[in-house]
Amino acid sequence: MRKALGILGFVAACELAGIIGSVFTTPSIPGWYAGLAKPVFNPPNAVFAPVWTALYALMGLAAFLVFVKGLEKKDVRTALSFFAAQLLLNVLWSVVFFGAHAILGGAVVIVLLWALIALTVSKFRTISRAAGALLLPYLIWVSFAAVLNFAIWRLNP
């Protein structure tokens, strides 16, 4: 039961990051975002929420798998620090791209986010191979999102 509550806590924390990001995202979708030119590979809006919900759940599980290795270990604390930093950048991207309507600013944030996710995957993998693997779909999705962000920037000078 304690393990399940721990997993639930980490997943809830990650989902909360998504909820905070959605506060900036949701109001911009029907107006500002709908009016942008988008590339042909832009997914339908309905795809984003379920994908992000699943990714936040995987992120929470991955963080829990690292956490249970013990906060007394420096590598665990370092890995979780990278994780927390990338989670903050994840929210910041929504604030910049959707909240501030800054497409180029979003591109800058997403490049930094991608780098921190890659570092987090590397740190997690040395502690728990499963935790590192659980973050790979997130890294792949953010890679796609970065390409999409840059394409939207190019189409909307």
Image (cartoon, rainbow, N blue to C red):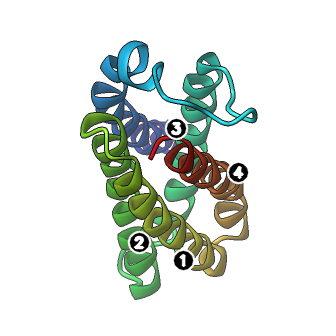
Q: Look at the image and tell me whether residue 57 can be seen.
A: yes
* C-beta proximity under 8 Å, tags 3 and 4: no
Please tell me the numbered disc located at residue 22: none
Q: Amino acid at mark 2?
A: Phe
* Residues under numbered marks 2 and 1 in contact, where contact means CB atoms less than 8 Å apart: yes
Q: Residues within 10 Å of mark 3 (few under 14, many from 20)?
A: few
Q: Residue at x 24, y 40 (%)?
A: 100
Residue 68 appears in the rendering = no
Q: Earlier in the sequence, mark 3 or mark 4?
A: 3
Name the residue at 68% across, 54% down.
Answer: 134
Give the structural element (helix, strand or loop) at label 3. Answer: helix
Q: CA distance from mark 1 to mark 3?
A: 27 Å
- Residue 49 percent across, percent down from the top left: 55, 24
Q: CA distance from mark 2 to mark 4?
A: 17 Å
Q: Using the numbered discs, state the Cα–Cα distance from disc 2 to disc 1 in whole angstroms.
A: 7 Å
Residue type indicated by callout 3: Ala
Label located before the other in sequence (1 or 3): 3
Residue 137 image label: 4
Residue ID at (39%, 80%) = 78
The amino acid type, in three-letter code, at marker 4 is Pro
Splitting the image into 4 quarters, where does residue 9 fall?
top left
Q: Decide: is 121 above or below 52.
A: below
Q: Secondary structure at mark 2?
A: helix
Out of 104 and 16, give the one closest to the viewer.
Answer: 104
Q: Mark 4: which secondary structure? A: helix
Which residue carries the number 2 mark? 82
First in residue order: circle 2 vs circle 3: 3
Badge nearest the viewer, 3 or 4: 4
Q: Which residue is mark 3?
A: 4
